[in-house]
Amino acid sequence: MKRLLSFLILAMASQAVAHQKVIIGHDARLPIKSSPARVQKLGEAVGLMFSPIYKSVNSKGLIDLDFPTLGDSLDLCPGQRFAKDRSAEINCTGFLVAPDLVVTAGHCMINTGTADNTRTPFCSDFEWYFGFDENKVNDLSPEDFYSCETVISVRHETIMRTIGVIESFGEDYALIKLDRPVKNRTPLKLATGDVRQGEPLTMIGHPSGLPKIFSPIGKVESNQEDLFYEVSLDSFGGNSGSPVMNRQNEVVGILVRGPEDYSWDERAQCRKAIKCSSTGRGCESHVKIFLPQVNRLDQIRDLLK
C-alpha cells in the first residue's frame, strides 16, 4: 500500500517527463561509506527527499523508515547491484548551499512551470533526511528529519509534443528553504566559473532511492547548450538534484535528466540496469536524451547573492 501511495504522489510528475538516468560504461558507483574520507565529508551536505508514508515513530520515540529493498521495489533480476539495499523508491536528491537552504532539480518541486516564494505540493508532501548513508533504517533521531518550509524559486520548463515525448528542455532547478538549519553539516561550495569540454566530474546522490552513492568517474561530454551540459556519470532516477562536482570539490551543476535506467527482461520477467557507452549509444529511449544532463548554476548563483 505504501508503495502504491508513493507512486500516486508523483504520478503527474512521472507522466510529464522521464528523469531516469543510466550506467555509462562500467558501473563505478561506490557506497558513500566505502568512499574516501574527503568524499564522505562532502556527502554530509547531500540529502534524500522522500515520502513520509514510510516514516513511523516506534515505542522508544525514535524514527523507523519502512523502506523496501531495491530488488523488491523494482523486481530486479538476480545479480543486479544494490538489490539488497534499502530504497526510498520515488525520491530526489538535494544539497545544502547554506545551513537551511537546499538546491535540487526543479521537477522535484513542481510538475512543470515556474513558482517563487511559495509552498508547492512536492515541498509540503515530502521530507528531507541527510543521514541516509547506509542501510540503517531503525531507531533514528527525529531531529535528523527536516521539512521544506518554502520554495524560494523553482523552474521546470520542458516542452513536450505528447506525454513523455520531449521537444526541448529548459531550466530545471529549485532553491528551497528548510524549516530549520541543518546541524553539523558543512554546505557545499559552488564553482564560480563554467565547465570545459572533457573536464573530469564526480557526483554524490541517492540513485533509485538508495543510501548515499558516490559516482567517481565522469566528464563533460558535450558543452554546447546554454542551460545544461551532458556528462558521462553513472546515474539513476533519484539522482535528480544531485551535486555534480569538479576536481576542486566545487559544485558545477545539478543532475536533472537522463535516458531510461532499467529495462524489463521479458524472458526472465525482471528488470536489469541499462548500460551505455560514453557517447550514449545503446541507451536510446523514447525521451530525446542520450546522456545524463546537468543544469548549469547561473540562476542559483544569482539567487544566493
Image (spheres, rainbow, N blue to C red):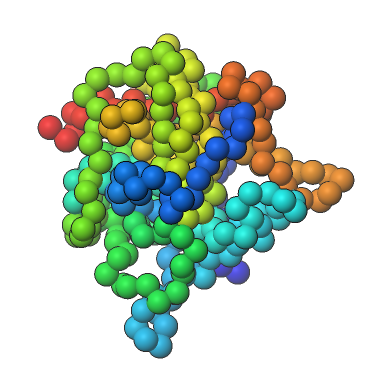
Farthest residue toward the left?
305
**Residue 72 locus on image (x, y percent):** 66, 61
User: Looking at the image, is 16 positioned above or below residue 137?
Assistant: above
Viewer can see residue 302 = yes
Farthest residue toward the bottom?
59
Occupied quadrant, residue 251: top left
Question: Is residue 238 found left or right of 93 in the rendered image?
Answer: right
Residue located at (37% from left, 72% from top)? 140
**Residue 46 locus on image (x, y percent):** 34, 48
Quarter of the image with the C terminus in it: top left
Quarter of the image with the N terminus in it: bottom right
Residue located at (41% from left, 28% from top)? 201
User: Looking at the image, is 124 positioned above or below residue 197?
Assistant: below
Question: Is residue 186 found left or right of 197 in the rendered image?
Answer: left
The residue lying toward the viewer, choosing from 107 and 136, is 136
For the image, the number of numbered tags is 0
Farthest residue toward the front?
36
Residue located at (35% from left, 32% from top)? 245
**Residue 139 locus on image (x, y percent):** 40, 77
Viewer can see residue 120 = no
